[in-house]
Amino acid sequence: MSHAYKPVQWNRTKLIYDAFLVVGIGAYLLIFLTLAPRLSAAAALVEGPIWKMRAYGSCAFICLSLILAIGPLARLDTRFLPLLYNRRHFGVITACVATLHAKAVLDWYFAFAPISKLEALFTSNTSFGQVIGFPFEIFGILALTILLVMALTSHDFWLSFLTPKVWKGLHMLVYLAYGSVILHVALGALVGGGNPVTLMLVAASMIILITLHLRAGLAEARKERAFAAAPVAGAWVAFGDVDDIPEGRALIGTGAGGERIAVFKVKGGLSAMSNVCSHQGGPVGEGKVVLGLVTCPWHGFQ
C-alpha cells in the first residue's frame, strides 16, 4: 500500500461493470416504455412524454436504492463484493438518468411557459402550507443537485484535491438525496391521486434498506464486542483462529489502541496492515489478494 495519491486506471473489470449497468438500464427503460402503456385502458390514454418521465424517474429511484443496498449486502455476504467494486460508476450513471427525468419534465410541462423553464418550475407551485399539493418538485431538485455534485466530484482528482475526509463527507449526502427522492415521489404520487404501485415501491425500498443497514450495523457491533472481549497478552491481541482466515483474504480486528487491522493469509503466511485503504478510506480487509497485491473491494486500489 502507498500513502501517496495514485489514480486507479481503467481496466477490464470496470468496462464489464459499466457494460452491465448500461445494458440493464437500457433494458429496463425499453421494457417499461413498451409494457406500461398496455397495462390498462387508462394507461393507454397517458401521453407518451409522461411515460418517458416516469420511466426515467422510476429507473433513477431503483438505481439509487440499489446503490445504497450494495454496502450492507457486501458486509453481510462477501458474494456481493463484486458489486461494490466501482460503485461510484453506478452513481454517475444514476445521475445521468435522473437528469433525463428532469429534462423530460421541463420539456413537457414547461415547454410553452412565457418565462424560462427553470423559473417556471420554481414559481408554478408555491403551496407550502399544505401536504397534498406541496411543491414536491423542490425535493427532486435537491436530490438531483446532490447526485450531480457527487458525479462531478467522483474522479480521483477530487478525492486528492478535497482530501479523503471532505470527499467522503460530501458523498455521504447520498442519504439526504435518497430521503429527498422519497419525499419527491411520495408527495408527487399523492398529487396524482396516490398511485398504489408507486407508493408500494417507495415503501418496499425504505423497508429493505433500513433492514439491511440495521443488520449490517448489528453484525459489526457483534464483531466489535467479540474483539473487545478478546484476551490481551502483552503486545499481542487475539483476533481469532488462523484456520478461520480463507486463503487470499483477511480477518479484521481491533488493535489495543482501537485501530482497525486486517490480517491477510497468503500461501500459508500472515501479514497485518491497517484496514483503512489509502485511496478512499475503504475497508481494505474486506478485499482479497490478487497477484500478490492486497486489493480494496471499493475501487480495486492495490
Image: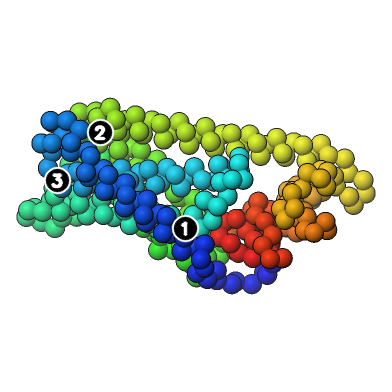
How many residues crowd around disc 2 within 10 Å: few (fewer than 14), some, or many (20 or more)? Answer: some
Classify residue 251 as left or right of residue 295: right
- For the point 61% across and 40% down, which residue is it? 76
Secondary structure beneath label 3 = helix
Q: Residues within 10 Å of mark 1 (few under 14, many from 20)?
A: some
Q: Amino acid at mark 3?
A: Gly
**Up/down of 211 relative to 60, above or below:** above
Work out whether residue 80 or residue 72 is closer to the camera in this orientation and state it. Answer: 80
Front disc: 3 or 2: 3
* Quadrant of the frame with the N terminus: bottom right
> Where residue 132 sits: x, y (%)?
23, 30
Q: x%, y% of residue 56?
A: 27, 48
Q: Residues within 10 Å of mark 3 (few under 14, many from 20)?
A: few
| Cα–Cα span, label 2 and label 1 | 33 Å
The residue beneath circle 3 is 48
Three-letter amino acid code of the residue under disc 2: Ala
Residue occupying the point 43% across, 34% down: 206
Q: Earlier in the sequence, mark 3 or mark 2?
A: 3
Name the spot of residue 218 as percent of width and height, x first.
Answer: 63, 34
Which of pointers 2 and 1 indicates the residue nearer the eye?
Answer: 1
Indicate which label's residue lies in the foreground, 1 or 3.
1
Label 1 sits on residue:
17
Residue tagged 2: 189
Secondary-structure class at tag 2: helix
Q: Label 1 is placed on what type of residue?
A: Tyr
Tell me which residue sits at (18%, 38%) in the image.
37
Q: Which of 9 and 33 lies nearest the eye of the viewer? A: 33
